Image (cartoon, helix red, strand yellow):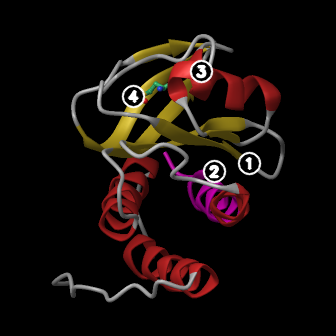
Amino acid sequence: MAYTPVAYPDDKPAFYQVLREQLALHLADAPTAVTALANASAVLSDALGDCNWIGFYLVRGDRLVLGPFQGKPAVMEIPYARGVCGAAWQQKATQVVRDVHAFAGHIACDCASASELAVPLFAADGRALGILDCDSPLPARFDEKDAAEMDAIAADLASRIANLA
Ligand code: SME
């Protein structure tokens, strides 16, 4: 299927509605979790403006390992509870970081990053699956409304990949 460029609305609720539709379209029948998250990173990167890194870290034992992403090469492993991503996993809660330089323990991957959103992916049975991580070169790129919308997207992604190899 050829990718058709999408016009995303400026209005935030409408934007996220179109984004969810695009994710559903491009993740339908994904054969593996990596396949689904690869297309998810591409769709998210295409949609979200002012982001320099968007992708996934996957839970493997007591650490996160780098998964599909769009952006510059990044740290490959993050121990439990470390950095913004580790905090999202440990606290089971989305981290909205308006200034990464003010976040104690922030792990710098791309020195252009100024703000960050890290959203945990949990299966319905409570298993931690991974983290959706978005970095922006703009301060305070993400707000609580973005966090709520991305929470819903992460829940959908988690249910899609929970039973895939
Ligand atoms: N900043 C993240 C590390 C991952 S990179 O941003 C891609 C963190 O502190 O966990």
Q: Are the residues tagged 3 and 2 within 8 Å (C-beta)?
A: no
Q: Nearer the viewer, mark 3 or mark 4?
A: 3
Determine the CA span between mark 3 and mark 1.
31 Å
Question: Which secondary structure class fits the magenta region best?
Answer: helix
Which residue is the site of mark 4?
66
- Tell me which residue sits at (36%, 19%) in the image: 76
Looking at the rendered structure, the secondary structure element under dot 4 is strand
Ranked by sequence position, the earlier of labels 4 and 1 is 4
Determine the CA span between mark 3 and mark 2.
34 Å
Whether disc 2's CB lies below 8 Å from ligand 1 is answered no
Residue 16 visible in the shown view: yes
Q: Quadrant of the N terminus?
A: bottom left
Amino acid type at mark 1 = Ala
* Neighbourhood count class around disc 2 (C-alpha, 10 Å): few under 14, some 14–19, many 20 upward: some
The stretch drawn in magenta includes residue 20: no
Amino acid type at mark 4 = Leu
* Neighbourhood count class around disc 3 (C-alpha, 10 Å): few under 14, some 14–19, many 20 upward: few
Q: Nearer the viewer, mark 3 or mark 2?
A: 3
The stretch drawn in magenta includes residue 153: yes
Residue 79 in the image: above or below residue 150: above
Say whether residue 133 is left or right of residue 146. Answer: left
Which residue is the site of mark 2?
162
Chain part drawn in magenta:
152-165
Determine the CA span between mark 4 and mark 2.
17 Å
> Picture coordinates of residue 34 (x, y %)?
39, 47
Q: Which numbered circle lies on residue 123?
A: 1
Ranked by sequence position, the earlier of labels 3 and 2 is 3
* Neighbourhood count class around disc 4 (C-alpha, 10 Å): few under 14, some 14–19, many 20 upward: many
